[in-house]
Amino acid sequence: MQYLSLTLLIFLPLIGALIIWGPWFAHNEVKIRRFAKGFGGVIFIYSLFFLAFFNPAKEGFQFEQTLTLPGGKPWLEPLGSNFALGVDGISLLLIVLTTFLVLLALIASKYSITKRHKFYYSMIFLLQTAILGVFAAKDLFLFIIFWEIELIPMYFLISVWGSGRKEYSAMKFILYTFAGSIFMLAAILAIVYYNYLQTGIFTFDLTTYTYMKAFAYPTLLGILAFLGFFIAFAVKLPVVPFHTWLPDAHVDAPTPVSMLLAGILLKMGGYGLIRMNLQIMPEIMQILAPLVIILGVINILYAAIVATAQQDLKKLVAYSSVSHMGIVLLGLGAMNVAGVSGAVFQMVAHGVISAGLFMIVGVIYLRTHTRQIPELGGLGQNSPKIMYFAMIIALGSLGLPLLIGFAAETLAFYGAFTSNVFSGFSLFDVYIPVSIQILTAIAIIGVIFTAVYILWMFQRVFWGNIFHKWRKFHDASPHEMVVLISLILVIVVFGLNPTGMTDIFGPTVSSLMKLI
Amino acid sequence: MELITQIKDVLLPESVMVLFILLTAILSFLLGSQKQNFIFYVSLTGVALALVSLSFADYTVEKQALWGSYVSDYFTFVFRIIILVGTAFTLFLTKDYVENFGRSKAEFYFLLLTASLGGMLLCGANDLVMVFIALETLSIASFALCGYTKLDKLSNEAALKYLTFGAAASAAMLYGFSFIYGITAQTNLGAIAGLLSTYEINSVLIIAFLLILAGFGFKISAAPFQAWAPDVYEGAPIPVAAYLSVVSKTAGFAVLIRFMTLIFPEAAIFSVILATIAVITMTAGNLMAMGQQNIRRLMAYSSIAHAGYILLGLAILTGEGITAMTFYLITYLFMNFGVWAAIELFALATGKDNIDDYSGLGIKYRYFSFGFVLCLLSLAGIPITAGFFSKFYLFKAVALAGFWYMPVLIIALINTVVALFYYMRIIKVIYLKPPAEIRHEHVFKIAFPVKAVMAVCVIGVITLGIFATPVIEESRVITVKQDQKVAVSR
């Protein structure tokens, strides 16, 4: 147990980045890639140990670690901030998802990355450090630090190795996220100051604000702070009015980076919503639950309809991501154990499935250099393996029973349907009987649209007769097989046995809901 | 005899500077034109000795010299260190730049040391006359430094512009002093503070405040007195631009802090005026920086924007605000000098200073670009660099000053987004564009002093970020002392 240090886990990737970036490492593409894959594997295995020694039944944070300066002084004393780390069921799951997907992205980088390898792999590792830090931070200040460090490697990953309007997309990504995060900064300062006024203690320690909160926030301050957090995470998740960076960034990023963007970066938004909005301000969340749920329904329907009309494969997958993130929002808005569990489950499920979908798109793009659906067709004739892999992932995405997507969506929708956060509201003295049940029923229409665009896309790309110009289309190479099979294993195993996953985060979610 | 005690206790660093200023002046005509570079070492020794001599005196208690017109306390101690370190950086930057100066090289060092002496005196000035003399010493030396490359048209324009603005600002400030003197019949700041503490705020005091603010606002390039900055930074020799953007500004802030804490009582009206000026300064600086093509002009606007952020610390009228300002100035010293060193190195190698000329630098010079980008990210306030911590600490101080400062805080935060955009533009050019041909590549190998400055700045930017606690604690000591002094004088 004492060898499991979260600090080490977070900074292992950074060490890897320094090893690769420094002058001591040869400018040899193969060597760099092999080292990166090996190092990514080590980090993944190390993170699995945390999962093995994790005790789900225990409440609160585990593997807690606080670094102090020599002399026992806290890290940033004048700020009331500490280098404090800790994980609970939700964050541990996302940490393992991160190390898993980064490893797969490193393997998938073989064909799509053709230049500046040292820079690329060190940036991937820097990104991993930042994301792991966000998930493990037990201090609001530390959370912001890692949240913003993540921008820089992502900017470079999109803008250097991307395609199309990559510089525009990267700049859009970084400005949107940074603009969102300043609202979070303001909100954090506001609640810290309020806590300081109430208790006289100036601290950024997360547990002060979540577990033993001795006071309720005044409604106006609470709503403003809630919205501050919400905007930051809504940009990241993304929620519909703030989503426009996502299709651009996903389309222009190289395949492995798209996998990471959809697989992990969006989860930072969902994680933030649970950790900050739900855990710090549950009473405000109850007031604003209609807003969250309506935004979630809009997300599901709007993005699904837009996805149906897409001709570009990657754009279609990107919009499907937005649609699926709406389910997370719906589950969180339900404010009950089933709903929040569904949201967490959906985050993991979507992380695996969307990474798989982007991998499939990348595989096709590598061979044809086009992502336009009308130009493709009949690819299944030449490449049965890719077709069957794609089929399983696509069916997982539309929520076929016994695959991971089904468990997640069902749980979230069940939670929303059985929730009683609101049963209608009055507007200008007119009572509008729009309850969460009705909204959920509307949202479920989105699932039909998902089936439409996924199956239609699959049919147009893989079935029928192959075009003459794609006659040399060859089947999956070993690297791609490894990536796809690993993802499909997760999709199938946790689809058949969802309790294997709910056992990890279920108790955390239950104790979270006890706050309300 | 009393003077000697005072020099020993209080004015030792300044005396060392005076000595070495005279020495450089003498050496400049004693040495032949081939040996002028020797003066660089002489002036560097002077700055180093001044730094060493700072440590001899005891700064835990306040001491006065020159009949009360100069005080030495912890506040002056810290600000003098910033100024001397900045001067040392400037000297290093000058070492390889002197080739552009033609025949007269030595006078540059003479003027630079004189300006720094003015800045040091300004930090501790405790008398209206002393403030004016110190400010003019700094200003007049800076005017001459700006126009040092006398055959360069831009340099001449810069000097003239700086001189005109500076003269007008000094005149306005002097007029403001006359009001203060009219109210109190005193020139000593401590005595004025004592008399004003019972004085009700009226329009005369507000006018005096605005006029004095014009004088100091010119030094720190706060809006609406910022218009000289872009032209001066573009035209002046690069070491001088770096010097003006950090050292001269630090001195201006030092005297402004002293004035605000001592003379002008903690009244809402002054807070509102300062907050308005801070907001306008940062917004104007950031918005105008967005469209710049020349990196020196961009850095000028960026330094205007940073002046706005720093002023915010003064506007909230709390001790934490001044702590945050001091910490910000310390980090600003490193991050800004890092960027200017990079600009100079590039300018020495290529003779160009447009942003587009930096294309592909990240591919050819990985470590150089890494340092450069790190300093830029620090200016933008991206974490793990010092800039993030100082900005956060400042914003924290603003948030803690009360909920009514929230709108100002939001505007400042939005400003950081705008700022990120133009810093990222430089980074984009460095890393994403195809490499351009660089004519004098050997400069990157030989310009050791410039690279040394950059290395020190990059190390400073990283370590000040991660180990910020001791530095903030040091800055906080200033505030405590300053508060005690205000209490005593009232």
Image: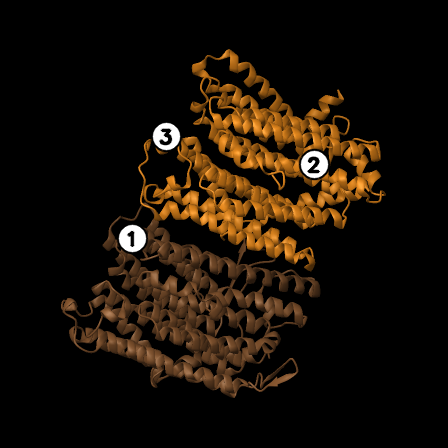
Whether residue B210 sits left or right of residue B359 in the image: it is right
Whether residue A495 sits left or right of residue B311 in the image: it is left
Q: Colour of chain B?
A: orange
Near mark 3 (Cα within 10 A), the count class, few <14, some 14-19 or many ≥20, is few
Q: Colour of chain A?
A: brown
Between discs 2 and 3, the one toward the N terminus: 2
Residue B86 placed where, x, y %? 55, 34
- Using the image, name the chain to which the residue with label 2 belongs: B
Q: Would you place residue A149 above or below residue A51 in this image?
A: above
Identity of the amino acid at label 1?
His
Do badges 2 and 3 share one subunit?
yes
Identity of the amino acid at label 2?
Asp
- Using the image, name the chain to which the residue with label 3 belongs: B
Q: Residue at x 45, y 78 (%)?
A: A327
- Disc 1 and disc 2: Cα gap in Å? 54 Å
Identity of the amino acid at label 3?
Ile
Q: Would you place residue A38 above or below residue B444 in this image?
A: below
> Which residue is labeled 1 in the image?
A117
Q: Which mark is residue B73?
A: 2
